[in-house]
Image (cartoon, grey):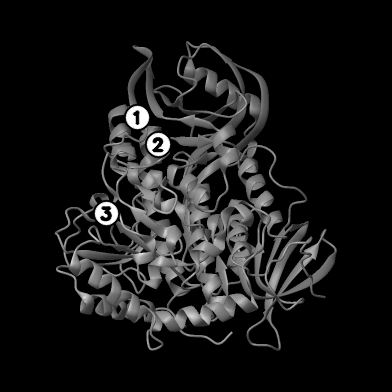
Amino acid sequence: MAITTSTNGHSNGHHDADIHDVCVVGAGPSGLMLSVVLAKLGLSVKVIDERPDQTTVGRADGIQPKTIETLQMLRIGDDLVQTGVKVHDICMWRGSPTEGLRRTGREVHYPSSVVDVLHPYILLCHQGMMEGTFITDLRKSGVEVTRSHTFQGVTDSSDPHILQIECDKDGETRTSIPARYLVGCDGARSAVRNAIPGAASQGTPHNSVWGVLDGELDTDFPDIWSKTVIFSEEHGSVLLIPRERNMTRLYIEMKSSVTSKGLGQEFVMEQARLIMAPYTVNWTSVEWFGNYQVSQRFATRFLDPTQRVFIAGDASHTHSPKAAQGMNTSVHDSWNLGWKLNLAARGFAKDGILLQSYEQERKKIAEDLINFDFEHANEIAGGDSQRLAENFRKNTRFISGVGVEYGPNELNHPLDAAPGGDAKPGCNLPQAKVTRYIDACPVDVQLDVPVLGQFRVYVVAPNLTDHQESGFIKGFDESISTPNSFVFQLGKSAQASYQQKPRASRADDVYVRPERYTTVNQLITFALLNKNEFELSDLPPAFSKSRWTVYLDDAAHLDTKRTSCTEKWLGSVDRGEVSILVVRPDGYVGAIRRIKNASFEDGAAAVSWLDSYFRGFLQITSA
């Protein structure tokens, strides 16, 4: 029997009523994030979870700066910023029988000299709050989580493009869900991973056992509102993290002779008191208690050979929770996969390239994370504050999320020369301040365009009054509008696709106005960045129609580094030089081209360059 999704009065595209584009197994942060992205982009999503309810307490709790920015790109997460605890620093303490317990160091968590972010802090709030934010947004797209459904297996159907996902409802009724793609976000013991040939989880568990407590403390310890690492030579380590609603989370290291199986709450509390002595530690309330044995593992495969079954989040990698990376990495697995699945479901993805890049890019990040986590966990357990501080400094960009970088592939074209600025293919587009020309509003350029599953092409022409630069813009416009341009053909094909299967129609569209950003091409938003006053009506059509993405680069005084957008992205720019930046739907830079002494002919050549870039992983499809 096929399960269908009620739209509850919302439009989530036009779909075959019995077949879902994607079935997502698991309604934790990874599964919900993926579902939010897919639903926004107009795909039919079925989300199942074996639990009867969402997470209410405990589990993951740290949201890193880049994750906050990603949520802002999706126009969600303001409630988390308002209610979560913001942690800006980290303190190190050490105790010994001869010297007692003392503070040995204090560091700014995200110094501006190292990492350029809008939110230079860790945001602390329990996993259920994050899930609630996603669930609320899903409902705006007309999607509800189907609970008490346990994944049992997947089989082919008579249609080679359709999978049959088998699950049990309440452990009794067997149900079959037809879908084009299946994504397992079902945790470290993933059943979906077991359905992928060769997707074994590799790695080794460690002897380190930790207890976890969320609760309200009565203590005279002075650094309760900082992220604090406490090491006792005699009794082990405690990681202390402030939390919402006046709570504190403690990760407490157990002796090697203790196993997680018989680890009780009172035993863990007493261990914390021993480590933090002579300070007193008592709990006025405990909201959640758990324990775990450190395991650092990742799957050998993130997708099956047919590129129809995928895994993300803890299903593909596990590690210690001490650097607040798990939920963040899981969310960005889904962020990477979501826009690619949208293009694949619409027929735009070249076989063996776009979807394969999900494993290529995210498996590397999982390996980087495991290597970092092994080193980081050892430094926390080792208790050397100088080595721990150095570990933080070395990995600050990676920990924050802005330093998570992808290698060269069909989507990320290496530069021909050394980068002049901070914008690099395979890296997040650096945040910068500009003025939106049409309404003179200062904006964060990397956040200004809403997520519609489209690429962004920024044309940086600092001096439009220059004859050469204006000629380039005209040549670019003429070539981008010709039927033999691959970019033009993509736009026409995408227009047909989104007419047949539109993006979700939501009540908040009246404020977001998504139609402003697809006036020229449904697959690409064109943007212009310059430094001169001009009239929008004087621009050629590709940019005069894109009036909400024409920007003045005159807001350096508002920037975190007091730097102009052009300088931050590209470094110094010569007179007459024009640059093009291709930004992927997930905010990563895909390619950069810089043209000296740009001319009308160079504008046409730039379109040929864009055609070549997109031909590398996309194809024209009939709706």
Q: Residues within 10 Å of mark 2 (few under 14, many from 20)?
A: many
Q: Nearer the viewer, mark 2 or mark 1?
A: 2
* Label number found at residue 120: 2
Residue beneath disc 1: 108
Q: Residue at x 32, y 42 (%)?
A: 115
The amino acid on which the numbered mark 3 sits, given as a three-letter code, is Asn
The amino acid on which the numbered mark 2 sits, given as a three-letter code, is Pro
Q: Where is residue 476 drawn, in percent x and y?
A: 30, 75
Of the 4 image quadrants, the one containing the N terminus is bottom right
Up/down of 497 relative to 44, above or below: below
The amino acid on which the numbered mark 1 sits, given as a three-letter code, is Val
* Label number found at residue 532: 3
Direction right: furthest residue: 173
Do the residues bearing badges 2 and 1 touch, measured as CB atoms within 8 Å? Answer: yes
Horizontally, is 451 left or right of 426 in the view? right
Q: Where is residue 532 drawn, in percent x and y?
A: 27, 54
